[in-house]
Amino acid sequence: MNPTPEFLRSTAERVARNAGVAIRKAKDEILQVDSAESHDIKLELDRRIQDLIRKEISRVHPDHGFLGEEGGEAAQPGQHEWVVDPIDGTVNLFYGIPHYAVSVACRLDGRALAGAIYDPNRDEMFLSHAGGGSTCNDKSIHVAERLKLEEAVVALGFSKGKASIQKCLELYRYYGDKVRKMRAMGSAALDLAYVAAGRLDAYIEQGVSIWDVAAGALIVEEAGGQVRISPGEPEGKIHLVASNGRIPLGMV
């Protein structure tokens, strides 16, 4: 029997919260760096948290697929697939910036059915399931009703490739004198959650991965917003535009 979206959401919520609790306990450790790239850091803690999430999901849904930032295999057609970023904002965590989250989503044939984003620093849980609206800490949330670009707060995600970084700089120049404020906060999942909650009016990212945005895209759409996904840079990445659907975006 296929699990209902509501049941999938309850699983996503539980495992995201448990992962966040584990991160809170571990964040003051001496963090072991697995790899340090020019624009990114991978921690042993990323792998540890993903293993925790995968084991917990497997106990409840042993026949489901699993795809995470730290490894996994894409699901077969007709198989439910969990898409997970154990720590979205690892660089923030490593540098002591309290802005990162756990992102957990469940999809079926590419369609998101449930999603959870948990911010362990603010103890905020953003949740949604298909057709069920979106919540933050059990209170219904909706995208902002702002209509004017000059009143908007827009977030941009800086990617790792040179071409996508250049595009982000062009976007900053384009929007810099058109919007109220620009933001670059370092967590795609939380940027999407903030669009859903009306804190941001739009989020634009040139090169992000599916595990960064699978939960957040559903949460935005169920909160009344719009999400556009297309091929990004470098190859295999996603170009994502999420907004309240009301402000007139130009360059993306």
Image (cartoon, grey):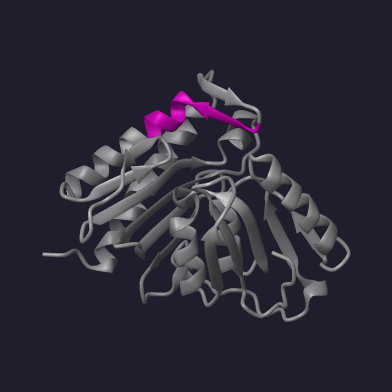
Magenta highlight range: 39-49
Q: Nearer the viewer, residue 111 or 233?
A: 233
Residue 93 relative to residue 34: left or right: right
Q: Quadrant of the N terminus?
A: bottom left
Q: Quadrant of the C terminus?
A: bottom right
User: Residue 107: percent from the left, percent from the top?
Assistant: 32, 60
Residue 10 relative to residue 219: left or right: left
Q: Kindly identify the residue that appears in the image at 29 percent across and 40 percent down.
A: 54
Decide whether residue 72 is among the magenta residues.
no
User: Residue 112: percent from the left, percent from the top?
Assistant: 37, 64
Residue 200 in view:
no
User: Residue 143: percent from the left, percent from the top?
Assistant: 59, 73
For residue 139, above or below residue 156:
below
User: Residue 120: percent from the left, percent from the top?
Assistant: 50, 44
For residue 130, above or below residue 85:
below
Instruction: Give the total of numbered labels.
Output: 0
Q: Kindly identify the residue that appears in the image at 49 percent across and 49 percent down.
A: 212
Residue at the far left in the pictured view: 1
Q: Kindly identify the residue that appears in the image at 37 percent across and 55 percent down.
A: 105
